[in-house]
């Protein structure tokens, strides 16, 4: 049924007018005949990202998270918007917060729950995010939780009367907060009024309160091998994600008191209500030090009905793998999930789609064991919505015959239908694109998909799936948002050219060439080889600002999926185990040779760059060949042994190496660029994040930089404060721009002869070089 504004929605429309601007007003088309221009690095400031689409229970509307950069370009703002699923109405803004994410419809379709990030306190620190409710009958959104450590991941009960969610809050936090409130009421005179607020979740480990109550220690007492995380910083093992539930009143503005359902020393997640609302299924792994063992996951449930609230959770099964994306079948008898087998131990183990009966001694069944692609996965670019979140990637059809999923397949990401008994896979969407997220209507006849292509960041489309019971999907796509219409009408963007070639040993390799605007095959262009990270990831038909901008600057950009990349099957991905870097480097060089045959690339103006695993291969490349005139290594690893000791996760199992470095130092040395640093003659820049715990800078580019300075070789290092391993994808917007400027600035200097005195030891006038260079 098409959504129409009725009397119920008139009030909502007034609210929307007061707090929001229609996308059409922001995206008015410029005057006809206006000349288009090349994309710039700073166009990122005007990007609009869409994330987490959620179709309403009647299928008529879709809510989503909209992301933009903030006014000062130091962060991102998120808000909840809504669009009619069918028709051509413009999206409208639903919430007026700057940090609103994760919208979820109540099953009766009358309200939307979401997570609202807090404002900054007097010290500049963000207050914890809380659960909020927006009624479609009108009125402002209201916050319904007030937990000291916040609340996240709201999941409605089937009767729309309760919400389950997760929180790191402990009873001690609540007691402390109540003391502070009591002190404030009493004028702050009691003991503890000046107690220092404890560190944010994940930032303190085993802190010990002062016996006098005047302060709480901020030291880290560490007893576990994995004690910090690239995203969270230092982990706090006193705190765990537990499941809470709260009643949601329709008649009172006074919020109910949330109740904690689970407790103990382990995290719980993937909340799923039973269809009668009496229990909640969840996933957990109750192992103190899981890095000593192969992954496993417990599927549990806990009582949620008022008379039996909480209690001891019941373990239904232990699944011998790490699993995610839990989905309950319509009849309540089965669950579906994604998981990767743990035996044999591999560097890369392909994710499959599994189903399991909810019965005693049930065993999971691999639906896609014979389908050799990555279920629940996608190819990646550099512009997934920062901080936008995502929705469920698994959906059952109402009759339980089908499961809807997405899959990374040979550089593309189609949405697929999987037969729940046979595992037969049918593609629903087609073409050179990536489905980043999707939601389906209750009858499973239409999906709302978030689609990205090399010339579009990502917009929502409806996809006709036909009569699902007969598998009659026609895949017709109809656009329902055009978030970047104004900006895109000004830009001259081009799709890349796909190439396929045979590597040195005959293995087929897929890649893409992004060409400069007004490309002339008779001219000679400089080349940038851009290597993806992972290494188990994949480039593909998805938007990548970096490639478009480099091409707009006059470079031919070559990006390739060498062996070890995902989306080409289990064996192709795992072939580099114990041989990384190695033959993947030879795949890349074969790709450079392939493009040189075409005659439009200057062999004396070759550049190479890559981040993370791409940084590893960039380092390795310049130790193996001098064919590149310049290199930029980003968030790299230069010394595998050092990395083994300092990264945020520890290789206690032989995924990439057969033994730890103290037992087999030669293997680590033989694969480390630092071992061969004297062979590096290519001018190389290192781009590093100061808060990067995934590839710490002192185990990567900093080591090579120091060694190359000793050798008096041309080098530079650009260090980004506050940035983690996610710099290129969700770093501070200004930092993302400066990263691009420095990468291309280095190539401009060494490939194009453009003066960049900031890279000299003694910056002088343009056109001069330092003695070291």
Image: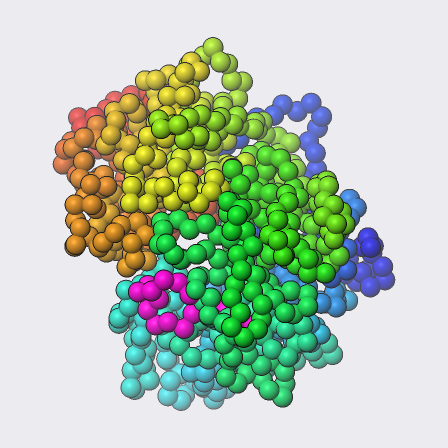
Q: Please, is residue 260 above or below residue 11 in the view?
A: below
Q: Is residue 104 above or below residue 144?
A: above
Residue 402: x %, y % from top left: 66, 55
Q: Single out the residue that lies furthest toward the top.
A: 522
Q: Nearer the viewer, residue 153 or 127?
A: 153
Q: Considering the image in quadrants, where does the C terminus appear? A: top left
569 or 725, which is in the foreground?
A: 569
Q: Residue furthest left?
A: 710
Image position, residue 617 (x, y; %): 32, 37
Please give the name of the residue rendered at 32% of the width and 52% of the height, measured from the top-left corner: 655
Left or right: 29 as drawn, with respect to 675:
right
- Magenta stretch contains residue 289: yes
Whether residue 426 appears in magenta in the rendering, the answer is: no
Answer left or right for 340 relative to 448.
left
In the rendered image, the quadrant that contains the N terminus is: bottom right
The part of the image, by quadrant, that contains residue 684 is: top left
- At x 46%, y 35%, the residue is 546
Q: Residue at x 74, y 65 (%)?
A: 109
Percent across and percent down for residue 622 are 26, 31
Instruction: Write the start and end of the magenta stretch as one range.
Output: 281-296
């Amino acid at each position: 049924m098409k959504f129409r504004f009725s009397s119920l929605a008139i009030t909502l429309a007034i609210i929307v007018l007061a707090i929001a601007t229609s996308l059409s007003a922001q995206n008015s088309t410029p005057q006809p005949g206006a000349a288009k221009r090349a994309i710039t690095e700073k166009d990122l400031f005007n990007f609009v990202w869409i994330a987490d689409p959620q179709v309403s229970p009647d299928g008529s509307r879709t809510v989503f998270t909209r992301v933009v950069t903030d006014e000062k370009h130091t962060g991102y703002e998120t808000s909840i918007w809504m669009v009619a699923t069918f028709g051509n109405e413009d999206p409208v803004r639903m919430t007026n917060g700057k940090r609103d994410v994760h919208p979820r419809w109540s099953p009766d379709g009358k309200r939307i729950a979401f997570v609202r990030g807090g404002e900054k306190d007097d010290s500049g620190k963000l207050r914890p995010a809380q659960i909020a409710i927006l009624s479609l009958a009108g009125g402002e959104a209201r916050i319904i939780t007030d937990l000291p450590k916040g609340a996240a991941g709201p999941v409605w009960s089937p009767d729309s009367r309760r919400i389950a969610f997760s929180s790191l809050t402990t009873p001690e936090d609540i007691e402390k907060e109540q003391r502070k409130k009591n002190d404030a009421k009493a004028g702050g005179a009691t003991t503890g009024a000046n107690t220092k607020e404890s560190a944010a979740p994940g930032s303190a480990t085993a802190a010990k309160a002062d016996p006098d109550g005047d302060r709480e220690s901020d030291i880290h007492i560490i007893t576990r091998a994995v004690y910090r995380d690239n995203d969270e910083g230092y982990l706090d093992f006193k705190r765990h994600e537990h499941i809470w539930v709260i009643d949601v009143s329709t008649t009172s503005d006074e919020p109910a008191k949330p109740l904690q359902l689970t407790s103990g020393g382990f995290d719980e997640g993937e909340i799923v209500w039973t269809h009668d609302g009496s229990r909640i299924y969840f996933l957990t792994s109750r192992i103190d030090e899981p890095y000593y063992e192969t992954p496993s996951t417990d599927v549990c449930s806990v009582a949620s009905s008022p008379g039996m609230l909480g209690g001891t959770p019941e373990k239904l099964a232990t699944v011998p793998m790490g699993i995610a994306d839990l989905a309950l079948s319509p009849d309540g008898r089965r669950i579906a999930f994604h998981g990767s087998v743990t035996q044999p131990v591999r560097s890369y183990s392909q994710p499959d789609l599994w189903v399991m009966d909810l019965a005693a001694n049930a065993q999971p069944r691999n639906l896609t064991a014979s389908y050799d692609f990555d279920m629940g996965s996608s190819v990646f670019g550099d512009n997934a919505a920062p901080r936008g979140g995502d929705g469920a990637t698994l959906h059952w059809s109402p009759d339980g015959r089908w499961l809807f999923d997405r899959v990374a397949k040979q550089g593309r990401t189609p949405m697929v239908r999987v037969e729940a008994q046979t595992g037969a896979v049918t593609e629903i969407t087609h073409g050179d694109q990536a489905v980043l997220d999707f939601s389906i209507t209750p009858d499973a006849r239409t999906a709302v998909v978030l689609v990205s292509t090399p010339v579009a960041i990502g917009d929502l489309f409806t996809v006709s799936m036909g009569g699902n019971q007969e598998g009659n999907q026609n895949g017709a796509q109809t656009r329902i948002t055009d978030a970047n219409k104004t900006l895109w009408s000004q830009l001259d963007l081009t799709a890349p050219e796909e190439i396929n070639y045979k590597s040195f040993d005959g293995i087929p390799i897929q890649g893409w060439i992004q060409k400069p605007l007004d490309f002339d095959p008779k001219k000679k262009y400089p080349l940038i080889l851009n290597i993806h990270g992972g290494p188990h990831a994949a480039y593909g038909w998805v938007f990548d600002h970096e490639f478009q901008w480099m091409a707009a600057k006059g470079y031919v950009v070559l990006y390739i999926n060498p062996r070890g990349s995902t989306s080409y099957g289990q064996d192709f991905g795992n072939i580099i185990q114990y041989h990384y870097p190695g033959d993947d480097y030879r795949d890349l060089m074969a790709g450079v040779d392939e493009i040189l045959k075409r005659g439009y690339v200057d062999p004396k103006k070759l550049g190479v760059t890559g981040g993370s695993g791409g940084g590893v291969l960039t380092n390795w490349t310049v130790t193996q060949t001098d064919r590149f005139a310049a290199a930029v290594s980003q968030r790299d690893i230069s010394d595998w042994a050092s990395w083994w000791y300092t990264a945020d996760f520890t290789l206690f199992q032989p995924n990439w190496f057969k033994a730890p470095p103290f037992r087999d130092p030669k293997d680590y040395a033989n694969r480390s660029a630092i071992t061969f640093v004297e062979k590096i003659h290519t001018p190389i820049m290192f781009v590093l994040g100061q808060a990067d715990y995934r590839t710490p800078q002192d185990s990567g580019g900093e080591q090579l930089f120091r060694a190359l300075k000793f050798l008096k070789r041309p080098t530079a290092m650009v260090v980004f404060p506050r940035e983690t391993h996610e710099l290129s994808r969700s770093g501070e917007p200004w930092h993302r721009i400066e990263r691009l400027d420095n990468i291309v600035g280095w190539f401009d200097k060494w490939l194009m002869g453009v003066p960049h005195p900031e890279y000299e030891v003694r910056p002088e006038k343009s056109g001069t070089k330092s003695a070291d260079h």
